[in-house]
Image (cartoon, helix red, strand yellow):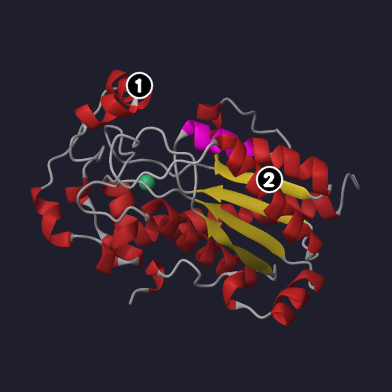
Amino acid sequence: MDQGDAIFAGTMAEMTWREVEDAAKDNAVALWAFGVIEQHGLHLPAGTDVYLPSARLRRVKAVLAERGVPSVIVPPFYWGVNFVSAAFPVSFQVRPQIMIELMVDIFASIVRDGFKQTFCVTGHGDALHNKTIIEAIQRGRAETRTDISFLAEDGLLKRLGVELADPRVTPFPSAPSTATFPDIHAGQWETSIMLAICPSLVHQDKLPGIPPVQFSPADLQDWRSAPEIARRKTPMGHVGEPALANPQAGQKDLDAGALAMAEAIIQRRNRISSPSRA
Ligand SMILES: [Zn+2]
């Protein structure tokens, strides 16, 4: 079994209560991934958006440890908000208000355990899913009076219309894309990372025969407008070119992303623990 197909791997679910108590006393930061289960083409498993950020956080945890920053990983959230893939099977849909209430309860649990800083990351590009995360963070911050934020690529935050200086977010630089057309769903990028973290779940035999789906900005807007339109425009389910995927590119992306995320976490941690000494 690949480690990548065990979503509890490296999380608090594998720790004893004493280990968790010690981590909180040690002022560890809490890291929490938010995916969804939805179709990912004919070659990737429906849990891709959960496996990816989970693997990313394990890497972030390792980088933080190298830099002397302790962390814990909260078991991933996987009942997210699905819209675009909703006309396909295996797209579980949760109402935003339910996701918010559940998140607020878990934030309270994390804080009750003694953790003072929580970073949430997403594995799913749906705008409503990510806006829901930010709204829940706002509630969590107000109700727990601790530093909870959305650790996200600046490109995603811009798409969501969120200011980079917003206290609810911790931006990190987006990775430069080499794709000449949108590679956003089960395409080259996601497939490469899945090949790096859990190749046993990728239908590698199918990859060479999967045609590219090259969207214009107008296509993309259309695709995002309604589930039925999305299914009609992409009958196989992917947007991008999965046949170009390779595990080396996936590993490189994971490492670079984890480094950028860890740096953003450390910056915020230093800022919060020593406010305005200047
Ligand atoms: Zn995905």
In which quarter of the view is residue 21 placed?
Answer: bottom right
**Chain part drawn in magenta:** 127-134
Q: Is residue 275 visible?
A: yes
Which numbered circle lies on residue 149? 2
In which quarter of the view is residue 99 placed?
Answer: top right
Q: Position of residue 124 (x, y in %)?
A: 45, 44
Q: Which amino acid type corresponds to the residue marked 1 in the rendered image?
A: Gln
User: Rounded to the nearest whole Å, what is the CA distance between mark 1 and mark 2?
Assistant: 28 Å
Task: Give the overall secondary structure of the magenta segment.
Answer: helix
Left or right relative to 138: residue 84: left
Picture quarter with the N terminus: bottom left
Q: Which amino acid type corresponds to the residue marked 2 in the rendered image?
A: Ser
Q: Position of residue 229 (x, y in %)?
A: 27, 24
| Secondary structure category for the residue under label 2 | strand
Residue furthest top as drawn: 218
Query: Residue beneath label 1, please?
Result: 221
Closer-to-camera residue (256/53): 53
Residue furthest left as drawn: 209
